[in-house]
Image (tube, helix red, strand yellow):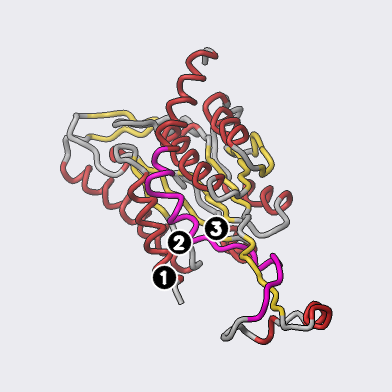
Amino acid sequence: MLQKELLRKIRRIEIVTNRAADESLAGRYHSVFKGRGMEFAEVRPYQPGDDIRFIDWNVSARMNELFVKVFHEERQLTIMLLVDVSASGRFGTRSHFKSGLAAQITGLLAFSAIKNNDRVGLLLFSNRVEQYAPPKKGRKHILRLISLIFSHQPEHAGTNITQALDYLNRVQHRRAIVFLISDFQEGGYARRLGAVAHRHDLIPVVIRDPMESRIPPAGVVCFADAETGALTWLDTSSRRGRALFEKRVAEEDLLRRQLFKQLGLDSIHLETHRDPAPPLVEFFQKRAKRLAP
């Protein structure tokens, strides 16, 4: 990609995602993702109603009056964005390729995070870990992450979610909020999802294109698997053939949702022909309501 085109894409995604983060996401993000704990801020004179457990007896003795410790929530979190860059992402029949939607949702989450002074890291994976950017703070860092997504040329076509999660556990020792952004078109990752969910707050983000679940009648069509190259012929003019295809896709989607529910994972489901911001806002709202005391 030419440098000028890359800069134009980065600038556009910054404007779109930054505005959305300002208008609707950052506040909800803050209310959903709590800090790691409480940190000491200062002492102040005791006031009626203060919790006596927070009285600072050393300061009180020196000042000859009661003082209490004041704590603030330790807000800084680590956000890890695991983005699937396999060949199946280079597909889209509406507004975006799936890879383009992944870049947009990455920008939305990243800008929401830095507005709350959190650190953001990025891991790009296919059937190998292709690139890793350690978590940092700041606008310049976020723009670098978005640039990596747009400029990265995948070296491999396949998908291996398990390997990506294993790598995450090796490099991220402290608890993090992990957004796993993929079309989840490969299997065998259930056990690793569960293991990572015990260590981190894991949130699957499923990206799909409408054409992957509903095929219009267009005669005999050859479908090529972008990751393996396997060819499948389907007579799309056959109502029964289309129904069987759609049934299989629906069953796979149901099994995936049931797996997430079984593991206690909150998930986000996006499609290439829809703005990703409203589903993300809805996700934050539902999660805040569920986690409310």
In this figure, what is the number of numbered marks?
3
Q: Residue 25: where, in percent of width, then height?
A: 42, 49
Q: Earlier in the sequence, mark 3 or mark 1?
A: 3
- Return the x and y of residue 88 as percentages of the image width and height: 45, 35
Looking at the image, which residue is at 70% across and 67% down? Answer: 42
Q: Identify the residue under disc 2.
A: 266
Q: Which residue is mark 3?
A: 202
Give the residue at x 37% y 54%: 252
Measuring from the top left, give residue 243's x and y in whole percent: 21, 48
* C-alpha distance separating marks 3 and 2: 8 Å
- Mark 2 is on which residue type? Asp
SS of the residue under disc 2: loop
Q: Is residue 177 magenta?
A: no
Residue interval drawn in magenta: 19-46
Instruction: Report if the CB atoms under discs 1 and 2 are less than 8 Å apart.
Output: yes
Residue in the picture at 37% in, 53% down? 281
Asked if the residue under mark 2 is in contact with the one under mark 3, i.e. CB atoms within 8 Å, the reply is no
Q: Which residue is mark 1?
A: 290
Q: Is 141 placed left or right of 206 in the picture?
A: right
Q: Say few, some or many: other residues with alpha carbon within 10 Å of mark 1 (under 14 / 14 to 19 / 20 or more).
A: few
Indicate the secondary structure of the residue bearing disc 3.
strand
Judge whether 74 appears above or below 172 on screen: below
Foreground mark, 3 or 1, reads: 1
- CA–CA distance in space, label 3 to label 1: 16 Å
